[in-house]
Image (cartoon, rainbow, N blue to C red):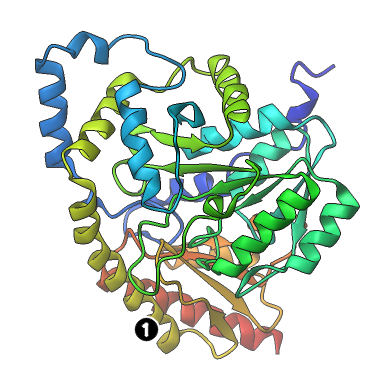
Amino acid sequence: MSEYSTRMNGLSGSATREILKLTALPDMISFAGGLPATQCLPVKEIREITADILSGAGATGALQYGLSEGVPAFREQLKDFLSDVGIKVSSTDNLFVVSGGQQGIDLMCKVFLDKGDVVLVENPTYLAFLQIAATYEARVVGVESDKQGLVLSDLEEKIKKHKPKFIYVVPTFSNPTGRSYTAENRRGIAYLADKYGVMVLEDDPYSRLRFTGDFVPALKSYDISDKVVYVTSFSKILSPGLRVAVMAGGKEVIRKLVIAKQGTDLHTASLSQLIACEYLKRGYLKPDIEKSLPVYRTRKEAMTRALDEFMPEEFHRTDPEGGLFIWGEFSVPVDAGKCFDDAVKRNVAYVPGSVFYADGKGQNTLRLNYSNADEEKIRRGVKALGEMFKQKISEVK
């Protein structure tokens, strides 16, 4: 008899995390992760803030247990932070602090999902969500998408058919595709959520990393009946190592999520919260983002140029207006998963696209990250991929 719980059956480690282990190999060019650029991490500001906190009157509080909802002063700051993406929060009872966006996803699943419950997602979707949902033995059903966002007719049909507990979306610079939903599409999702009484989890780690195009308010801003729970992380705009994020929603939902968090880690690290709080209070966020955006824009443009130059004509890509990822698809039967080992032999890593699909499809797709490699490495790595994929295509023709 197995000593492990039945929910561990069939679970495996993150494909992305396993691939990231390869980045430690000498000379490996990694397009696999989602790390912020090293030079964009605000080391100087964090050092200054941390020193001030630990030398001030509140030093012991920074090292003590805290409220499960989060540091009160930080939660007040977060109301203005959320207003930047169109979310109006009148009371701190409508938000709380979590230990990274992924904990927010886990808490949502813990609060809403029983074994066999259905969750609707965009196909493809964030890999970690698929893993977390599997841990709770939920059934994940993919919804068709296009350049506008979710196909609303397909979403409505699947809401009626499957009666999902909630819908999970990454509507701005999606991981993995880099695409964004239009304002009209977001309004349509909020309308269907209200019409059928189904919850929505909006995951938004990338929206502040926009380097072209027009701002689109968060899906949560179109919420008319507290059906949308919003989670956003400081990992891409401050530091992933601090593990700080915020969830916003209706008071009753937030209360349930806080209760679930109490049984998980009691509270998010007080010192991390105070660092993030001071970072906002001192006005560092916006100028630091403004300094980061040219780095990401330059690297994204370097990758799109290299892809257009070196990849086979059967390869088609997205052209994101922000975020960290480009999505690629082949119009011929090339299995990116089976090609991966050959890419590694050429010292290049990417993420095969099939791991992002709820239904296991997408063998002819892949995700590329441009944020954590310089222009020279991007060009060299894409050239190597292009040579490999051209060879693979010639073999299947």
Residue 341 placement: quadrant = bottom right
How far across and how far down the image is residue 125, in percent? 63, 56
Mark 1 residue element: helix
Q: Residue 45: percent from the left, percent from the top?
A: 14, 39
Question: What kind of residue is marked 1?
Answer: Arg
332 w.r.t. 138: above or below:
below
Q: Which of these two is toward me, 195 or 329? A: 195
Q: Is residue 200 above or below residue 151?
A: above
386 to 355, vertically: above or below: below
Q: Residue at x 37, y 65 (%)?
A: 370
> Residue 371: x, y in percent?
34, 61
Q: Which residue is mark 1?
A: 305
Q: With 64 as the anchor, is 119 left or right in this view?
A: right
Which quadrant holds the C terminus?
bottom right
In the image, residue 66 sits, relative to residue 385, either above or below, namely: above
Visible residue check, residue 7: yes
Question: Where residue 48 sits in the image (x, y, percent)?
Answer: 10, 32
Q: Considering depth in this image, is 37 or 330 the residue closer to the camera? A: 37
